[in-house]
Amino acid sequence: MHCLTVLYPKPDDPHAFRAYYVDRHIPLARTLPGLVSATYAFPEPMGPGDPPFCVFQGYFADAAGMAAALESDIGAKVAADVPNYSPKGATLCNFPVTET
């Protein structure tokens, strides 16, 4: 399993971000080819420092499947949609899932 994680900074208009993200962007992201499952959350701080405003995690069978999804037509649409709700952008990272 391979995880794509997307971290979003605090937006200027949190309400507008949430509404667009939940109602429009997440349904689009769920159509990524090869996506096995996905989760998103709006984390609360647990100590010093600011957490990301929103976190998305998408799971794929492997890194090649994730790369293919991001390079697909749907992947391009998902990426092009980000400025519609997050003008400050997003930070993407990925990793193989290790079970303990």
Image (cartoon, rainbow, N blue to C red):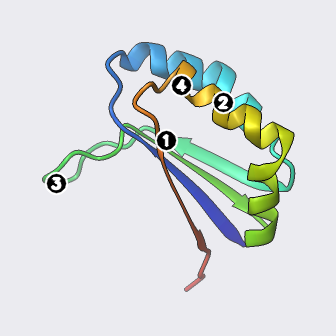
Q: Residues within 10 Å of mark 3 (few under 14, many from 20)?
A: few
- Locate residue 70, reporting x and y percent: 74, 51
Which residue is drawn at the image coordinates 22% and 52% (left, top)? Answer: 46
Kind of residue sitting beneath label 3: Gly
Query: Circle 4 is placed at which residue position?
Result: 83
Which circle marks residue 41 in the picture? 1
Which residue is drawn at the image coordinates 53% and 25% (left, top)? Answer: 83
Q: Is residue 49 left or right of residue 61?
A: left
Q: Earlier in the sequence, mark 4 or mark 3?
A: 3
Which circle marks residue 80 in the picture? 2
Q: Residues within 10 Å of mark 1 (few under 14, many from 20)?
A: few
Q: Is residue 46 left or right of residue 28?
A: left
Which residue is drawn at the image coordinates 17% and 50% (left, top)? Answer: 49
Which circle marks residue 13 in the picture? none
Kind of residue sitting beneath label 2: Ala
> Pointers 2 and 4 in contact (CB under 8 A)?
yes
Viewer-side residue, 4 vs 99: 4
**Label 4 – label 3 distance at C-alpha:** 29 Å
- Locate residue 59, reporting x and y percent: 70, 60
